[in-house]
Amino acid sequence: MKTISITLEEIYSLSKKTLLGNGCNEETATILAELIRNAERDGSLSHGLFRLPAYVAGLRSGKIDGKGRPEIKKISPSIIKVNGKNCLAAVVLDKSLPLLAKAAIENGVAILAINNSHHMAAMWPETEKLTEYGLVAFACTSYKPAVAPAGAIKPLFGTNPISFAWPRQGKTPVVYDMATASMAMGEVQVAKREGNKVPIGTGLTKDGNETTDPAAIADGGVLLPFGGYKGSAIAMMVELMAGALVGDNFSYETAEKDNNDGGPPSGGEFILAISPEKTAKKNWQVHAENFFNKMKSMANVRLPGERRHQNRMNKGPRNINEELIKKIKSLS
């Protein structure tokens, strides 16, 4: 794979130019370009520039509204409901997360229920953002079917990621963002593009056979849930939390309604914010730090998010797939 060196500012500029040239207004292009740059900065390669052609596909087909604004309603002191109105999720989150944080700080706990938005980015940005307010956060969203329930060979679940974040005073938060599939589909697609194999247990061929070939999984095959029945149960939970609970689609319903242009489909997201100041004893931060220190005293243990935050300290250029850069430039 040939790569070229490109600065973080160039990643941002290229992303913003491409988005502006494909139907986004200044605000939407800025928010999403920052998200893409930050994903590349932090080493989340399957959610950075790799996603930009898909965003463009959705914008060009008219499925995604690159100039719209979400409609936000406070249903109760602790529940905020958002109609994304086919905006990109990054815009919805930019407008609604401060309101969620305020409600959680005031009431101890608050929920953000999002409908009709297009989420294709990593999920750590929203949960990590809430830790800046001193809040514990959990988020989940579904997608189109790509994962077979345990025991099946046909897809029903999306990759159905979940993200959790815990705030730390004076330190970077503990944050994880994981697909409930054995591997995120974006990572499988990156492996396919770069000619790498994936581990056994990642997915099945279209005939239901185990494989290490990412193309056999991505092109007509199916992903498997992580941990067999346990991961399958968590994926089912995400379907319910980000679908029925917020009044949006299950993954199979999303697929039935999508125009299959390659862009992210419209769907829901569930976000929970909790204030430890109201739920925990007064020394909750010290209590948690003692736990983290106990974890890190064990050999080869790294707290979730540490590698990403370490990558963030590197402000230098990143090596990006050359063919991907050429493709993006052709779109702008």
Image: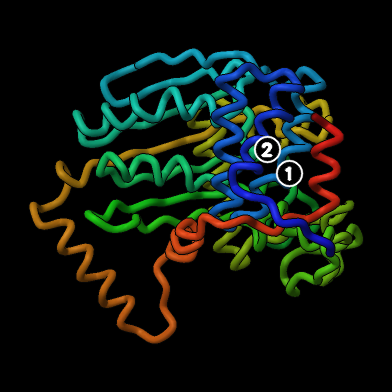
Where is residue 258 shown, x and y percent of the image? Answer: 77, 27
Q: At numbered mark 1, what does the secondary structure look like: helix, strand or loop?
A: loop
**Residue 145: numbered disc:** 1
**Which of the marked residues, 1 or 2, is nearer the chain's N terminus?**
1
Residue 126, image quadrant: top left
The residue closer to the viewer here, 134 or 184, is 134
The Cα atoms of the two marked residues, 1 and 2, are separated by 5 Å
Q: Position of residue 241 (x, y in %)?
A: 50, 38
On screen, residue 315 versus residue 182, left or right, reads left
Residue drawn at (39%, 86%), measured in percent from left and top? 299
Q: Is residue 205 left or right of residue 76?
A: right
- Tag 2 residue: 251
The answer to whether one can see residue 311 in this image is yes
Asked if one can make out residue 121 in the rendered structure from this viewpoint, the answer is no
Residue density around tag 1, few if under 14, some if 14–19, many if 20 or more, within 10 Å: many
Q: Secondary structure at mark 2?
A: helix
Q: Position of residue 139 (x, y in %)?
A: 46, 42
For the residue carrying disc 2, how many other residues have a C-alpha within 10 Å: few (<14), some (14-19), or many (20+)?
Answer: many
Q: Residue at x 26, y 74 (%)?
A: 293
Going by the picture, which residue comes out furthest to the right?
Answer: 207
Q: Quadrant of residue 170?
A: bottom left
Q: If the image is split into quadrants, where does the N terminus sit?
A: bottom right
Q: Amino acid at mark 2?
A: Ser
In the rendered image, residue 41, in percent from the top left (x then y), is placed at 56, 52
Front residue (pair 126, 273): 126
In the depicted structure, whether residue 309 falls above or below residue 102: below
Tag 1–tag 2 contact (CB < 8 Å): yes
Quadrant for the C terminus, please: top right
Instruction: Indicate the amino acid at tag 1.
Output: Pro
